[in-house]
Image (cartoon, helix red, strand yellow):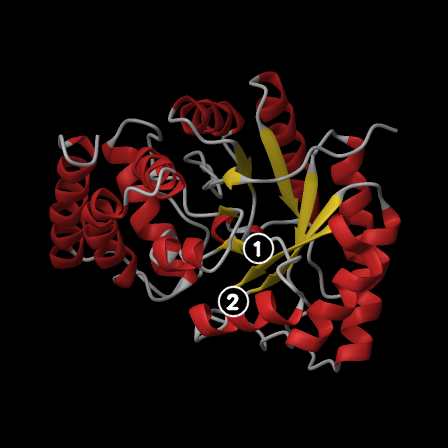
Amino acid sequence: MSAPRPLAGVLPVVQTPFAADGTVDEAALRREVDWVVDQGAHGVTTGMVSEILRMTSTECARLAEVVAEQARARGALSVVSCGAESTFGAVAAARHAESVGADAVMAIPPITVQLGDDALFGYYSAIVEATGLGVVVQDASGYVGRSLSIELQMRLLDRYGDRVYFKPEAAPIGQRLTLLREATGGRARVFEGTGGAALVDSYRRGIVGTMPGSEVTWAIVRLWDLVEAGRWDAAYEISGPLSALVALQTSIDVFVAVEKHLLVRQGVLERTDARAPHGFVLDPETRDEVDRLFDLLRTRTLSGRAA
């Protein structure tokens, strides 16, 4: 078995397109992956905004297959979500991801039970040891579940080294990222996970990449290139409207609605359908504000200063 490719750079989380009958539109999904890669992303990811929590296990398995296959055909990385409510389910999903050619898996902890560090260490250890893939330990407590302790993340890094990555989303993000960096002597490889809103600050604190939504991949790629080049003034030109756009998205359902609206607007997807029941519908005034910020973001990204 060959060593997994290291993860770094811009790895957007794809939206799952649904057909009129509610089934996953695989052809549209493949086009979306192609579009994301065409914008300069280093790979693609599946995650909660892919609506995996509202999909069947069969659909999730097929989603992993299509995304990994399409990414591989384009020479791009793929990271597949494998988090589950049981260790057994998470391990099965991780093994399936490896079997279909994914480069890594990403796992949130179980969200229906409160677990201590020892139980969580056992859960993540089982996932890491089940395959030869890299494992992204996702703290999704900004949206679901409880935050993961710095001590737990240190234990995982000490045990598994380069096999593990981290995606901390618990507030305050910047301070917790610094705590993780200092506690691990800068060894922890971390991805920003706030849609790019915290990318500039997080980059200064040592991240190796970002996992935003897919809808403005072109802006995130440009922003990443700018911070990599140390062009901070130009980076802030893009970061401003991007952060304002992300600030409107206060839950998973809002992320889904906004991202699908913008993907349809750009001709990437044909439909904005999301799996029901959901707790947010994009009203006209919010949609108009999203469009205004999107237009400003596009103007800033294409401007001479940020180009």
What is the x, y in percent for residue 147?
Answer: 58, 76
- Mark 2 residue crowding within 10 angstroms, few (<14) / some (14–19) / many (20+): many
The picture quadrant where one finds residue 149 is bottom right
The quadrant of the picture occupied by the N terminus is top right
Q: Nearer the viewer, residue 185 or 102?
A: 185
Residue at image position (69%, 48%) is 57
What is the x, y in percent for residue 296?
Answer: 13, 43
Residue 214 visible within the image: yes
Residue 86 visible within the image: no
- Mark 1 residue crowding within 10 angstroms, few (<14) / some (14–19) / many (20+): many
Sooner in the amino-acid sequence: mark 2 or mark 1: 2
Q: CA distance from mark 2 to mark 1?
A: 8 Å
SS assignment at label 1:
loop
The picture quadrant where one finds residue 221 is top left
Residue at image position (64%, 43%) is 80
What is the x, y in percent for residue 197?
Answer: 33, 56
Residue at image position (84%, 61%) is 159
Contact (Cβ within 8 Å) of mark 2 with mark 1: yes
What is the x, y in percent for residue 190?
Answer: 57, 55
Check disc 2 and report the residue beneath it: 177
Check disc 1 and report the residue beneath it: 190
Q: Which residue sits furthest top?
A: 73
The picture quadrant where one finds residue 43 is top right
